Image: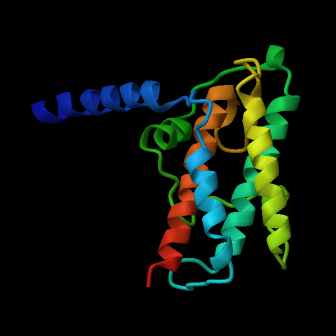
Amino acid sequence: MKKLFWAIPTIVGVMLIGYTINNKESDANFLDEQLTRISQYFDQRTVRNEEISSADVAWHLDHTLKTINNISRNLERSDPNKFTSSFNIQQVVVHTTGIIPRGVAKSPKAVLPPDEILLDSLKLQLAAARENLSKIQGLDEDAFYSHSVFDNLDRDQTRRFLEIHTNHHLKIIADILEK
């Protein structure tokens, strides 16, 4: 019982330290490597593996790029003077671990891919993502994105979310392609 008494505060303390360290992303080139990987998957966009995902590689590519572009534009349009911060345990867990559980979240309509995903559309979205991400660094630190689960994320928390979300879908794509 005494061990349990000390274990819980220790776990909470470690989570809070991890959250503090992993809550923000400030590297100006934070998604460069992931965007390169996305472009390398374009040729395999029609591959599907029902055991991993009901969607093909193109769906994950399109969704990821739409998410980056929509969130970047929302962040740019935000009014930093209206930013409010709040404690959100789901955000703490995801930002600390860097993991989004599979099959739990539902994508908003704005970032759902169309029925037919064209290569030219992916290429245009990739170019837009690179441009949009380059603008984020120059935004006010209190520029924010209102996430449906995590509440308001400031600029660097939003960048951390984009990194986690992009890696989530890149892992799914890698699993789809693994035979």
Q: Residue at x 74, y 34 (%)?
A: 134
| Residue 85 to residue 23: above or below | above
Asked which quadrant contains residue 97, the reply is top left
Residue 8 place in picture, x, y as percent:
26, 33
Q: Can residue 69 be seen in this view?
A: yes
Q: Is residue 112 visible?
A: no
| Residue 91 to residue 78: above or below | below
Q: Residue at x 51, y 84 (%)?
A: 51
Q: Nearer the viewer, residue 54 or 93?
A: 54
Q: Nearer the viewer, residue 5 or 76?
A: 76
| Residue 156 to residue 163: above or below | above
Is 179 positioned to the left or the right of 153 in the image? left
Residue 27 place in picture, x, y as percent:
56, 30
Q: Which of 148 and 53 is in front in this view?
A: 53
Q: Which residue is drawn at 84% across and 39% down?
A: 73
Q: Which of the image's four quarters has the N terminus?
A: top left
Residue 128 place in picture, x, y as percent:
82, 49
Is 54 positioned to the left or the right of 144 in the image? left
Q: Which residue is drawn at 29% across and 33% down?
A: 11
| Residue 166 to residue 112: above or below | above
Asked which quadrant contains residue 125, the reply is bottom right
Furthest-top residue in this view? 81
